[in-house]
Structure formats: structure tokens, C-alpha cells
């Protein structure tokens, strides 16, 4: 067990009845990083987090937090948690919810400071049950950070947030990382991982398909996109052997290729009127779709 | 954004060690908010805090007041009935329905993931139920003179103890239901047990002979007998056995419930 990892899942297996949720999963979180866990529904993201939080035990393999069992409350005093589904007491006011969670930690922020950091000060005296879905998520975020944890687990933190609230949350996450905290984030939003993550793991069927920096994941997918205005027809271009796929979009041609340079040469030679050429690497979204599809998820 | 960095301390807390003072504060805070939320739920607070005393005033003062004036034991019987009725409710409902709900809707999972001291969840609910029982006993004592009842100091404290500690077995029964039932079935189970315990134990009226034989299976019966002993109404069985049964029910059901809670959540 390497204590350099804040959270460490090694060869973790977990079955629910006949369903394999985790199939020998390895995940390691290093100090000071924002680590995004991506994957389609049922990939095992939430199960992986549950093992690291000590909510469930792996059938095989190990789950460690700060080199120790996550089931020890001492270990968990160094983490903050925001879960996907948690119906908090609707009768308690926002400040009270945050105060309650703060009481679990040795050196917490004041509820006021946590609310200021998460832009929820205006909600302080509102009963939790009267908040909108997005406001509830913001309050849960305040509860996750109030203990000044070294490691934050955020399960789909921005689901239900409007664009502005999401941007504010991102800014706070960056500040927390700059201040030395580490963050594990599961998300459906690829742009969230792209915008925030130092490292990404793509999960499918309870295994890690790929992990690395956003750029590394992206480069696993060699395909490029050429977007151009041309007099050539879709059928002509699609027939070229180097072209994987071609579609016409509003009198422009969108061509997916493995070798952009050779297709570009051929385009330029075939069409003297070729205009507005753009070549783009696949984004994380394309990489994600491709990685998970190749594994027939 | 400089405002944000200004609020963050330069270094993150480097210790996972919780000073005893803060640990106690965690328990206190959990209990405080558990009690507060129940006070803020009128559907919970009003019936459990208000009904016992209202029903006592209705039956023992308004309707049967004249009859009871001449029959001290009847007056004490009614006092015991409504006081114990009040003591049962918060424990069995507070644990039974809330635990089932909080298990199912993720609150308990979140608390298990957070560094909440593990016993704090149950201790908070227990203190809430005991606090409600204490309030019920206090209001019953307050209206006691209207029912022409007078207790000695010793009786007063003994009754308060019976009422307050008497809430514990009902907490355990509620907890046992709460860890096994779904949030939809819990109200049904809680109500069935609650009604059975009230009506099949002889709490409100003397039972026919065939029911009297099985009354001792209900904790309410034992609590009622203890109550009778304190105030000098003829009672059945020995106090030691009553206390042993109530303690046994509390410990046994809590043990099974907590075991299941720890292993399955």
C-alpha cells in the first residue's frame, strides 16, 4: 500500500447479486490533484466512490484512504463528501445544516465562511426543504467543504446547477486545489472534466478503460475532424479510403479522418475552391464516446 | 476572487484527531438539530406533545371528573394511561418512520460517509425521544391537580424516571422497525404495533380475561405496572421483572437493529 496516495483502490471487485459492478478496478488519487472519474451510467463510478468512503466493502482487493481503512471515522475526518442522492432534513435551515456537518470535524470553517465560499450566504436562513434543486446542490457543496478536508469527493456536483452557479462552483474548486486540497469528481459533463481535471479516468463495466491527463485521453483517439466548404459532394469524399465518415452540414462538409494531412492534400488538389478549412482534434467528448463504444458498453 | 482566497487559511488542518470537547459538541449538535427539526414538524410535535394532556383533560377532568374524584385508583389509572401514551409515541414514531426514511433517501448514507461519530445518529434520536417524554411528563404533572391527584416528592421523581426511561424500549422497537421496513411500509408497521401495545396491554381499560393472560408480552404492560407500584395502585408482578423485561426488550432489539444498520446501512 503506497501511502503517497490519498485514496487508493487496488484490484477492487464488487458484485451485486449476479451483476458485476467493479471488475478489478484500480484508482489512485494523488495529493493536490483534481481527478475526474468519467463513465456512462452503470460504469461503476458511484460504487468505486462508495468503497473509498467505506460505505461498502470490496469483495476482493483493497480500498484505502490516507493509507488506512475508510471505515475508521478518524480517516474520514480528512474528507468532505457531496453525494448524488441525499434527502437532508427539510426542516433545518441552511446555516444549521452546515453547522451540523461542521461539528463532525476537528478544525472546520465557520458556517458563514463556508457559505461565503460557496455563494450561499443569501440562503442562510431558508429552510432546506424550500430550496430549488440547484440551491440544494450548492448547500451540499458548502457542507462538503466546511470541514476543510484534504480530500473532497464530489459525485456529480453540478447536476441541476445553472450555468452561472456551475462556473462559480468551478472557481471555488480551483481555489480549493490551489490551497492544497485534492478532489475526486465524478461527472457526466465532459466539459467539466476538460475544464477542471488534472487527471481523468474513463470507467466502463467496472474497469478503467483509460486514465491520464485530458490531453493524453484525447490523444488516445487519433481521429481528427475536418470542417470545410467545398464543391465536392459527400458521396465523392466518403468514397476516399482515408475517410472514416463524411456528412454535409449546412453546405459544409464534416469529415472524420485518421490522417488529416493526407486528406487535406487530396481535398486541396480536388477542389480549387476549397474554403474555410478547420482541422480539430477530437474533444474529450468524442474520445469518451469512442473509448466506451469500442468496449461495447 | 481575492476575497475567496482571503477566507481560506494558509494551510489545511493537519490533524484527524478530534479533541474530546469537539467530540461532545458533535453529539450535542446532532441531538440539538434532531430535536429542533421534530419541534418544527407540527404533524409530529403537536400530537405527541399536545394529545396526551388534552385527552387526559377531556376524559379524566371533563367527562369522568366527578366519578374520579371519589375513586383515586381510577384517577391514577387514567393518569398512567395518558402519560404512558405520550411517552411511547416519539420513540416509536421518531425512530420507526425517520430511520426507514433516512435509510432509503440517502441521509444515513451521507452521514456514514461523513465523519459523524457513528453512535451520534442514534443517540440524537434517543435524546429527542427522551426530551419529548420529559415534556409530556412535565405537562401531565402540570395538569395533575385538575384530576385531583397529588404525589409526594419521591413519587414525583419516581414517576418522572419511569416516564423518561420508559421511552427507551419504544425507541428500540421503532429502531427495529426502521432498519427493516421501507419508508412506505414503516408507517403501517409502526401504527399496528403502536395500536396493539396501547389496546392489548390494558393501558386504557381493563382487559377481558383471555387478553389479560397475554398482556405481559407488551412493554406497555410492564411500564404501566411499574407506574402503578410507584403511586400505590394494586399492581401485578415484581418490579424487578418489569424492569428486566423493559431493559431486555431495549437491549435485544437495539442490538439486532444496530447490527443490521452497521452491516447493511
Image (spheres, helix red, strand yellow):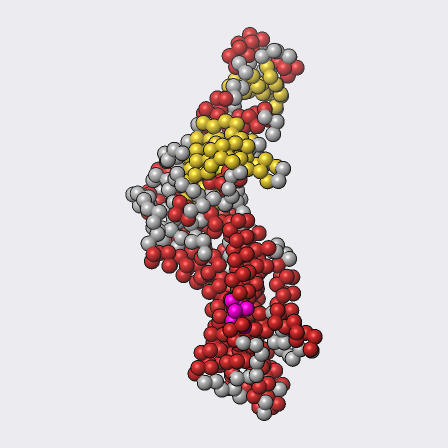
Residue reaching furthest to the left: B10
Residue reaching furthest to the bottom: B70
User: In the rendering, at what x and y percent does residue A183 appear?
Assistant: 42, 38
**Is B233 drawn above or below residue B191 in the view shown?**
below
**Is B161 drawn above or below residue A71 in the view shown?**
below
Q: Camera-side residue: A72 or B134?
A: A72
Residue at x-position 47% and y-position 47%: B113
Q: In this view, does B200 lie to the left or right of A62?
A: right
> Is residue A47 on the magenta stretch?
no
Magenta segment boundaries in residue numbering: B242-247
In this view of the protein, can residue A141 be seen by the observer? no
**Is A215 drawn above or below residue B257 in the view shown?**
above
User: In the rendering, at what x and y percent does residue A76 appear?
Assistant: 41, 46
> Is residue B246 on the magenta stretch?
yes
Residue at x-position 63% and y-position 15%: A238
Q: Camera-side residue: B54 or A206?
A: A206
Q: Which secondary structure dominates the residues rendered in magenta?
A: helix
Amino acid at each position: 500500500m503506497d501511502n503517497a496516495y490519498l485514496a487508493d483502490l487496488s484490484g477492487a471487485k464488487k458484485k451485486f447479486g449476479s451483476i458485476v459492478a467493479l471488475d478489478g478496478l484500480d484508482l489512485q488519487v494523488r495529493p493536490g490533484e483534481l481527478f475526474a472519474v468519467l463513465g456512462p451510467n452503470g460504469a461503476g463510478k458511484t460504487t468505486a466512490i462508495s468503497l473509498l468512503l467505506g460505505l461498502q466493502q470490496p469483495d476482493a482487493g483493497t480500498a484505502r484512504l490516507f493509507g488506512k481503512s475508510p471505515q475508521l471515522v478518524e480517516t474520514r475526518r480528512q474528507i468532505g463528501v457531496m453525494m448524488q442522492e441525499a434527502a437532508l432534513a427539510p426542516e433545518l435551515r441552511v446555516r444549521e445544516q452546515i453547522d451540523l456537518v461542521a461539528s463532525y470535524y476537528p478544525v472546520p470553517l465557520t458556517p458563514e465562511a463556508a457559505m461565503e465560499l460557496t455563494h450561499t450566504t443569501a440562503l442562510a436562513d431558508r429552510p432546506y426543504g424550500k430550496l430549488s434543486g440547484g440551491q440544494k446542490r450548492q448547500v451540499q457543496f458548502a457542507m462538503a467543504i466546511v470541514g476543510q478536508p484534504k480530500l473532497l469527493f464530489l459525485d456529480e456536483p453540478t447536476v441541476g446547477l445553472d450555468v452561472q452557479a456551475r462556473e462559480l462552483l468551478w472557481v471555488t474548486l480551483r481555489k480549493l486545489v490551489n490551497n492544497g486540497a485534492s478532489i475526486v469528481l465524478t461527472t457526466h459533463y465532459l466539459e467539466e472534466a476538460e475544464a477542471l481535471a488534472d487527471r481523468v479516468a474513463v470507467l466502463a463495466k467496472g474497469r478503467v478503460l483509460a486514465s491520464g491527463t485530458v490531453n493524453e485521453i484525447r490523444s488516445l483517439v487519433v481521429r481528427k475532424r475536418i470542417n470545410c466548404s467545398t464543391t465536392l459532394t459527400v458521396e465523392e469524399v466518403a468514397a476516399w479510403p482515408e475517410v472514416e465518415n463524411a456528412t454535409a452540414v449546412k453546405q459544409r462538409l464534416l469529415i472524420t479522418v485518421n490522417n488529416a494531412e493526407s486528406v487535406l492534400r487530396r481535398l486541396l488538389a480536388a477542389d480549387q475552391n476549397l474554403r474555410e478549412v478547420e482541422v480539430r482534434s477530437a474533444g474529450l467528448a468524442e474520445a469518451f464516446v469512442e473509448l466506451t463504444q469500442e468496449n461495447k458498453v | 476572487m481575492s476575497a475567496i482566497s482571503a477566507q481560506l487559511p494558509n494551510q489545511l488542518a493537519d490533524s484527524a484527531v478530534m479533541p474530546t470537547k469537539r467530540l461532545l459538541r458533535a453529539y450535542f449538535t446532532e441531538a440539538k438539530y434532531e430535536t429542533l427539526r421534530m419541534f418544527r414538524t407540527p404533524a409530529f410535535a403537536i400530537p405527541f406533545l399536545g394529545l396526551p394532556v388534552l385527552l387526559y383533560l377531556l376524559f379524566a377532568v371533563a367527562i369522568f371528573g366527578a366519578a374520579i374524584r371519589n375513586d383515586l385508583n381510577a384517577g391514577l389509572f387514567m393518569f398512567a394511561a395518558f402519560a404512558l401514551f405520550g411517552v411511547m409515541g416519539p420513540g416509536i414514531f421518531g425512530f420507526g418512520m425517520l430511520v426507514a426514511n433516512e435509510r432509503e433517501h440517502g441521509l444515513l448514507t451521507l452521514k456514514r460517509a461523513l465523519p459523524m461519530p457513528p453512535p451520534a445518529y442514534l443517540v440524537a434520536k434517543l435524546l429527542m425521544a427522551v426530551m419529548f417524554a420529559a415534556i409530556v411528563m412535565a405537562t401531565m404533572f402540570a395538569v395533575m391537580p385538575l384530576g385531583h391527584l397529588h404525589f409526594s416528592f419521591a413519587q414525583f421523581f419516581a414517576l418522572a424516571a419511569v416516564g423518561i426511561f420508559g421511552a427507551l424500549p419504544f425507541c428500540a422497537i421503532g429502531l427495529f422497525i426502521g432498519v427493516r421496513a421501507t419508508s412506505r411500509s414503516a408507517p403501517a408497521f409502526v401504527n399496528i404495533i403502536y395500536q396493539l401495545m396501547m389496546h392489548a396491554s390494558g393501558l386504557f381499560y381493563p382487559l377481558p380475561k383471555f387478553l389479560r393472560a397475554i398482556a405481559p408480552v407488551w412493554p406497555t404492560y410492564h411500564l404501566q405496572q411499574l407506574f402503578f407500584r410507584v403511586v400505590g395502585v394494586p399492581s401485578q408482578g415484581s418490579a424487578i421483572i418489569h424492569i428486566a423485561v423493559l431493559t431486555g426488550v431495549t437491549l435485544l432489539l437495539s442490538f439486532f437493529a444496530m447490527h443490521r444498520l452497521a452491516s447493511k446501512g
